[in-house]
Amino acid sequence: MFNKKAKPYTELLGKTNRIVEGTIIKGDIISKADFRLDGELIGNFESTGKLVIGPAGSVTGDIICNNADIEGKFNGNIQVTEVLNVKSKASINGEVTVGKLSVEPGADFSASCVMKINVKNLYITDGRETEQKKTS
């Protein structure tokens, strides 16, 4: 009778992972929850949640996530299933594949960009990637 939609994994956690300014990570990050990066990541990032790269944050590597807000620096390939927001102080270099794109005036967006309606949803289970096609 009452169809309750299952809460996303992120809401169940109620927390956002955070890497603070001055921290450097060399390696890959895999997370099911939202993530805020104000430090530096040299490696790849995968999440079924949202990634926020703060003004002091930088990523050199590949990113796969559902949503992203970038205010810092990014160099590599990024695949965002839903919405990528590029803030005015951001610097993006590489290849971008998104469902929807928002770029504020003043941003350095030096990337090739492909917008796809049917972007693959990538789900991470035990470190392994599985695919499901988005229908719309």
Image (cartoon, rainbow, N blue to C red):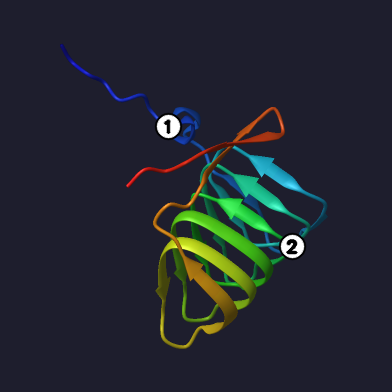
Counting labels gives 2
Query: In percent of the image, x 54 and y 63: which residue is there?
Result: 97
- Residue closest to the eye, 100 or 107: 100
Query: In percent of the image, x 70 and y 62: which residue is there?
Result: 39
Give the residue number, with chain letter if any, for mark 1.
8
The first of marks 2 and 1 along the sequence is: 1
Q: Amino acid at mark 1?
A: Pro
Mark 2 is surrounded, within 10 Å at the Cα level, by few (under 14), some (14 to 19) or many (20 or more) other residues, namely some
Q: CA distance from mark 2 to mark 1?
A: 27 Å
Measuring from the top left, give residue 131's x and y in whole percent: 57, 38
Depth-wise, is mark 2 or mark 1 nearer the camera?
2
Q: Quadrant of the N terminus?
A: top left
- Residue 126: which quarter of the image? top right
Query: In percent of the image, x 59 and y 44: which residue is there?
Result: 47
Query: In percent of the image, x 38 and y 28: which residue is there?
Result: 7
Q: Is residue 83 above or below residue 75?
A: above
Marking on residue 103: none
Looking at this rendering, what residue extends furthest in the top direction?
A: 1
Q: Is residue 39 above or below residue 89?
A: above
- Residue 62: which quarter of the image? bottom right
Give the residue number, with chain letter if any, for mark 2.
61
Q: Amino acid at mark 2?
A: Gly
Q: Are marks 2 and 1 in contact (CB under 8 Å)?
A: no
Looking at this rendering, what residue extends furthest in the left direction?
A: 1
Q: Secondary structure at mark 2?
A: loop
- Residue 100: which quarter of the image? bottom left
Q: Secondary structure at mark 1?
A: loop
Q: Is residue 6 above or below residue 11?
A: above
Measuring from the top left, give residue 36's x and y in whole percent: 58, 54
Mark 1 is surrounded, within 10 Å at the Cα level, by few (under 14), some (14 to 19) or many (20 or more) other residues, namely few
- Residue closest to the eye, 18 or 5: 5
Measuring from the top left, give residue 136's x and y in whole percent: 32, 47
